[in-house]
Amino acid sequence: MSDPATLPLPTTAPAIELRDVTRSFPGPPEVQALKGASVSVADGEYVSITGPSGSGKSTMLNILGLLDRPTVGEYRLGGVLTGVLDEDDRAAVRARHLGFVFQAFHLMSRRTALQNVLLPMLYNGTPRAEREPRAREALERVGLGHRTDFLPGTLSGGERQRVAVARAVASRPRVLLADEPTGNLDSARSAEIMNLFEELHADGLTLVVITHDEEVARRASRRIRLADGRVSEAG
Amino acid sequence: MAPADRFRFPDLLGEATADIGSRPGRLVTTIVGTVLGIAALIATIGLAQTAAGQIARQFDANAATQLVVGPRTANTGGGATIAAGALPWDAVSRLERLAGIESAAVLAEVQLPEAVVTAVPVNDPSRPPSAPPPIYAASAELLDTVGGRLATGRFFDAGHDGRADRVAVLGIRAAERLGLQRVDTQPSVFIDGIAYAVLGVVGSADVRAELLNAVIVPTETARADFRLAAPGDVQARIAIGAGPQLRNQAALALAPDDPESLEVRAPDGRSELGRDVQADVNGVFLVLAVIVLLAGGVGIANVTMLSVMERVGEIGLRRAIGATGRQIAGQFVAESVVIGLLGGLIGAALGVFAVVVISVVRDWTPVVDPRVAVGGALLGAVVGLVAGGLPAHRAARIEPVDALRGGT
Ligand SMILES: Nc1ncnc2c1ncn2[C@@H]1O[C@H](COP(=O)(O)OP(=O)(O)O)[C@@H](O)[C@H]1O
Ligand SMILES: [Mg+2]
């Protein structure tokens, strides 16, 4: 098939559409982390997913991020059915259309902030000459223009997470997926990150943020609850 | 939009080399096996080449300019051999007419197994019997032809030969055995009681070193006194490169009616010089070097595997941001290839250095084929390539979800 990474995603379709997705981990005992979950996220929406520990939040995010596949059901990303994509195609879609922010930051400790932000552009086909300007721009964007040459070890937790956000948005994804982005931060640092997310949302980025922090969840324009692998919407 | 610069070779190389120097201690332990293995290989091969070069220097200069013609020997069937032909007595003048012959001399060993050779007229029966020195009959040009140098005195000339004078020249070791160190006292050697005036002592010869053990008398003298039937060989010094052409001409000039009866030993053309001197590589060292190199490969494989395990989080992250399994594998393979190449380069340098040091100590001219040194460095890279294969395969198969759960 033609490279799905290069296909323009139709804007009329929802950015994300899960239909009756079940993800079971073969045991013993077999665990159904998601049970017939259906979620649709429109382009440009800011959605939070909350739920108790073990309710299937990370499992859902991994599926949305093409890091995992549904056992049953289908997942459309920008209207494109993802089940038919092979691993290389999925990697290409991740590189071009998805950005990730993790609770544990996942920065490379021996690379500077700038080098960390540059990393995704190795894989998504950003022309070589544009890489560094974009990375610097992204660091400016998260308020770390003065920290480009710092190693992660010399940055505070909040700064590290902002580097991770810069890394996620530097390659200009359509969807930003964040799994407990404030889980390792105090409330003041959390607020900084949430402000940043709101700005990105205002710029048209689609955001899906997993959290168990009510404060954080309330900032999203739409909230989805997960309980024992089942989805329920909440005002 | 085409994926313009999607993880091209420069990106791969950049990622593979970015972290290599971050742990110098580990890098050293990783490459030490490869360094030693390559160094041992290069040193073993280099020393063999140096030794061969040492031989070839003498070999080329001397053997390449020598031609020997002798009667072809035929097998009688009973295990014994007989000469199929004989050289004429005027062999030297016949040969000297040929282009490319610079000097020629006839030479024959006189077979006198019972001969008693002494430096005093009276045989002393109390002396322990010892084998007599070999006696050679030669023409006057012999000294020039074999590149001989006199330790003392002079060589006999054509006049002595023509008159069948009873004169002799001794090889230096024969002179020592006979106790004759000086010729200004006009000493004699006695062959079966007949005195031969010793004219000189030959100190060295480029070829036919056996002459240094011998008593040499003129051919005509040997014909008269020992009934020498025919010259054994004609020895000639020839121009470099004249061998192939003289091989045919010499036999025709010496035996026009039956050239097949003579055997001509002449050097091959110039291009083949030295090729016969094979580098005699020490097999034991070679095997040891290969074993050390294998251990070096295992070392790289181990450390790369360790590095994969330590960097699971990084692998997960790279996969999440769009790296394919192949790109991850490529990164680790490239890393171990670079490490192997580094080991190879250092090892090759050490090996060459060892050859130079040993050569200087032994007073040799060090010879290391640059292709061997370059090949050694590349072999290090190959070791890295092979060693990186399994860890890279592992790295590529790490599930990003599992990898990310760990956290960095
Ligand atoms: N790889 C796996 N193998 C087996 N069980 C798993 C695996 N991943 C998650 N689970 C299980 O699925 C359930 C949901 O996990 P997860 O999505 O991580 O929850 P959350 O992120 O909401 O805390 C849990 O019961 C967890 O133990
Ligand atoms: Mg979770």
Image (cartoon, coloured by chain):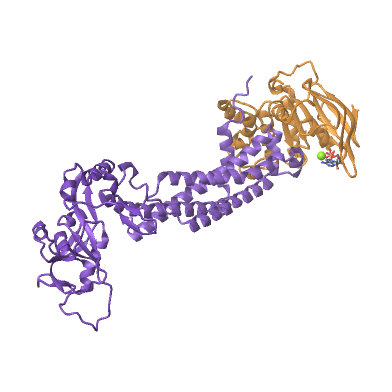
Chain colours: A orange, B purple
Q: Position of residue B232 (x, y in %)?
A: 24, 56
- Front residue of this view, candidates B362 and B107: B107
Q: Position of residue B229 (x, y in %)?
A: 21, 59
Quarter-wise, where is residue B158 in the image?
A: bottom left
Give the left or right position of residue B41, taking residue B319 as reference: left
Give the left or right position of residue A80, taking residue B175 as reference: right
Quadrant (top left, top right, bottom left, bottom right) of the C terminus of chain A: top right
Quarter-wise, where is residue B159 in the image?
A: bottom left
Residue A144 visible within the image? no
- Front residue of this view, candidates A143 and B72: B72
- Front residue of this view, candidates B24 and A198: B24
- Front residue of this view, candidates B339 and B22: B339
Q: Is residue B242 above or below residue A97?
A: below
Q: Which residue is found at the position 15% from the left and 77% from the top?
A: B121
Q: Position of residue A158 (x, y in %)?
A: 70, 39
Residue A80 visible within the image? yes
Q: Position of residue A203 (x, y in %)?
A: 71, 22
Q: Which residue is found at the position 60% from the left and 24% from the top?
A: B4
